[in-house]
Image (tube, rainbow, N blue to C red):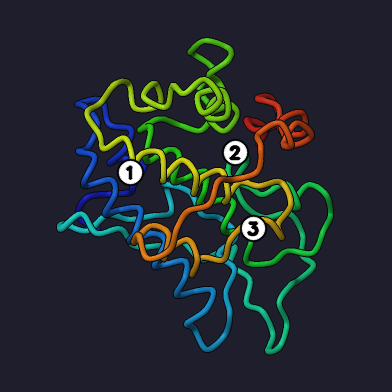
Amino acid sequence: MTNGSLADFLFRSDGRPAWEERIGIVLNVAQGILYLHEECVTQIIHCDIKPENILMSEQKCAKLADFGLAKLLKSEHTRTHTGFRGTRGYIAPEWLRNMPITVKADVYSFGVVLLEIICCRRSVNMDIPEDQVVLENWVYHCLEADELHKLVEDEEVDKTKLGGMIKIVLWCIQYEPSLRPSMKKVVLMLEGTVEIPAPPNPDSQSQHLEFLTPTEWLTD
């Protein structure tokens, strides 16, 4: 792809991409994952969704890439047992709990990537104030304090749209896989076709926040 990866596009030093461009990228990525989960002849779990594995075309259209860790589900199967796959910072908690893996693991990874697209920063950054190091944790605090503008560094964005996107993030990164929406539901929420309900209280995620500390996220 002529424009490199989504990581190159998001984390460049010459300024953040425009909000509307980022919104378009989010929908591209979500639709790509939906295709793997529900529209392929064989259901596919990508297992390593992250900005480096999303390539950008000349028209700034995002395409999923690097299927080296992908898992194909057998017909009539919805889950699989497999060894650890993916990249720290993007992996769903069930990978570390030795649980069966479903497409909901990709939904979790998408939620982290969505948050990075919104904020134009890495999910973990050790060079900033401690309460902001793990982006997934910080978003809870911003939501509770009604300070979501801090996530976009006071960039001029549609506040309603931003709030909706954050709600989608919070649904996608739920600790329990069963609470996460399908990618079909995610696409519908992004398109504005269905209402985005309020996610569960962030306090209910306390076990998760303890489970994924900054050190664990950065461990290879």
Q: Residue 161 carries which label?
A: 1
Identify which residue is drawn at 55% across, 64% down: 46
> Residue drawn 69% across and 85% down?
74
Query: Which residue is situated farthest in the right direction here?
Result: 98
Quarter of the image for residue 208 reads top right
Residue 5 at x, y = what percent?
Answer: 33, 49
Q: What residue type is labelled 3?
A: Ala
Identify the image quadrant of residue 89: top right
Read off the residue under disc 2. 89
The answer to whether 75 appears left or right of 40 in the picture is right
Q: Nearer the viewer, residue 105 or 206?
A: 206
Spatial distance from mark 1 to mark 3, Cα to Cα? 25 Å
The secondary element bearing badge 3 is classed as: helix
Q: How crowded is mark 1: few (under 14 residues within 10 Å), some or many (20 or more)?
A: few
Where, quadrant-wise, is the C terminus in this rendering? top right
For the point 58% across and 49% down, the residue is 171
Q: Label 1 amino acid?
A: Lys
Mark 2 crowdedness (10 Å alpha carbons): few <14, some 14-19, many ≥20 = many
Alpha carbons under labels 3 and 2: distance apart:
13 Å
* Mark 3, residue position: 105
Q: Residue at x 34, y 47 (%)?
A: 6
Residue 2, image x and y in percent?
A: 20, 55
Task: Answer whether labels 3 and 2 touch (C-beta < 8 Å).
Answer: no
Q: Which of 87 and 173 is in front in this view?
A: 173
- Residue 105 x, y percent position in the rendering: 64, 58
